[in-house]
Amino acid sequence: MSKGYWIARLEVTDSEKYDAYRASNAPAFDKYGGHFLVRGGTFEAPEGTSRTRNVVIEFPSYQAALDCYRSPEYATAKAARDGGAEMDLIIIEGYDEALS
């Protein structure tokens, strides 16, 4: 089974709301086995467009990544973030070389 990932690019527009989101998202990520691979950090964008903040979260499966986003726990965190960031988010299945 391939892992699942959230790949998010965002612009924080209200740091207090974004901080509230960060403080409230752990229950959802813990419940669905999500852990951060990238959480901000220095980056370079040699092609295309970028945003000022990038995040990658790994989940044990693609289904777990979807379930986390659709969960009531994440809905609570997302509501705390509303109006605090402009975000592009994709949820993607990881590549499993053994399956190819």
Image (tube, rainbow, N blue to C red):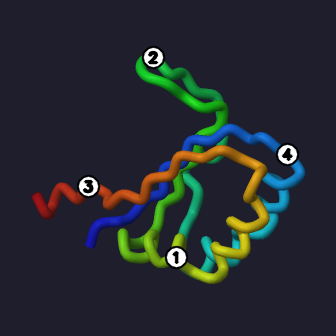
Q: Which residue is mark 1?
A: 70
Q: Callout 3: helix, strand or loop? A: loop
Is residue 24 rendered to the left or right of residue 31? right
Q: Nearer the viewer, residue 30 or 91?
A: 91
Q: Residue furthest top?
A: 46
Give the mark nearest the N terminus, 2 or 1: 2
User: Which of the 4 image quarters holds residue 28?
Assistant: bottom right
Tag on residue 95? 3
* Marks 3 and 1, how far apart at CA: 23 Å
Q: Nearer the viewer, residue 42 or 12?
A: 12
Q: Quadrant of the N terminus?
A: bottom left
* Marks 4 and 2, how far apart at CA: 27 Å
Q: Residue furthest left?
A: 100
User: What's under tag 2, amino acid-wise?
Assistant: Pro
Q: Callout 4: helix, strand or loop? A: helix
Give the mark nearest the N terminus, 1 or 4: 4
User: What's under tag 1, amino acid-wise?
Assistant: Arg
Give the mark nearest the N terminus, 3 or 1: 1
Tag on residue 15? 4
